[in-house]
Image: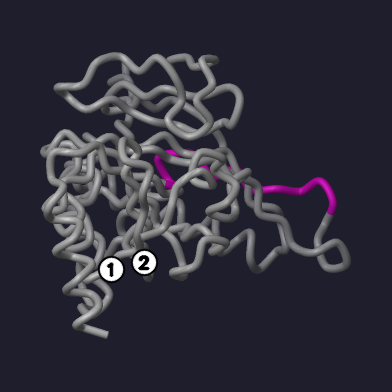
Amino acid sequence: MARPIKIRKLITPHKKVVFKPDVKSGRNGSKVILLPDEYETIKLVDYENMHHTQAAKILGVSRPTLTRTYEKARRKIAESLVELKALDVEEGRTVLGDLWYKCSNCESLFNIPKNGTEPGKCPLCFSKLIGEL
Amino acid sequence: MSAVLFQTDRRIMTKQNKNLTAVAVTDCKMNTGIEVCFGKAKYFFVADTESGTCEFAENPGLKYSESAGLRAAKFLINRGVKTVISSNFGAAVKEEFDKNNVRIVIMSDKFKYLSDIKWINNLKRK
């Protein structure tokens, strides 16, 4: 039996987004699904200019696994650009590094520092409708 | 410009024990837009929620080509900021804020301008 897949650790919760080509050139319905760990890898390696070793440590996987994920992610983005497909960043099997809260009124996310107490209200809109992510 | 910056720095430094909140913004006006990335913000809007005053501080990290976010984070921590608001934080910045017990708020896409945060409209600019 194969070893079960390690769950990836994200540092900040990511937002679900879809990137679409404009109406004229896009192909309706066809899309490429980018998994959250692939999105996070692209963000760490290409946006924050990290080495693969550093990025792998943050995601909690080995360096070769990260390099493979990075390769997959780049291929998917290229496919979306060349074949004019929508790029869908999905939610999937990931775990957050620490506890995050979400306000259901303004949809903002926030955490609590180590020495802080549990928040009673949202720091932006002061709504009390908050819950754990 | 540097003289003005020095004055702003000293004013913020005198209130290290207060509860300060920083927002990453694109300009030093009250109706400015909110910067998407924390490290790339031109200015930080620093609000003192206890005394009801606010001011703008320039991002010192922008002068450098590398690790602008980390420099900005250290600058805000030295000034005694307890809560930081932006839409996107990098891994290094998040780690630095966690070490110093600073709360991170990731705002949703509903907030596009500084005036969209309602409690900010009640503050007085120095």
Q: Earlier in the sequence, mark 1 or mark 2?
A: 2
Give the side of residue B110 with respect to residue B36, left or right. Answer: right
Q: Secondary structure at mark 2?
A: strand
Task: In the rendered view, tell whether residue B12 sits above or below residue A81.
Answer: above
- Which residue is at 26% across, 48% downward? B91
Name the residue carrying label 1: B59
Residue B38 image point, x, y percent: 36, 57
Range drawn in magenta: A28-39
In the image, is residue A38 part of the stretch drawn in magenta? yes
Amino acid, disc 1:
Asn
Q: Are marks 1 and 2 in contact (CB under 8 Å)?
A: yes
- Which residue is at 32% across, 19% downward? A4
- Which residue is at 45% across, 47% downward? B123
In the image, is residue B37 part of the stretch drawn in magenta? no
Colour scheme of this structure image? one colour
Q: Nearer the viewer, residue A101 or A106?
A: A106
Amino acid, disc 2:
Tyr
Name the residue carrying label 2: B43
Q: Residue furthest right?
A: A24
Q: Quadrant of the C terminus of chain B?
A: bottom left
Which numbered disc covers residue A12? none
- Which residue is at 50% across, 39% downward? B119
Give the side of residue B102 with respect to residue B54, left or right. Answer: left
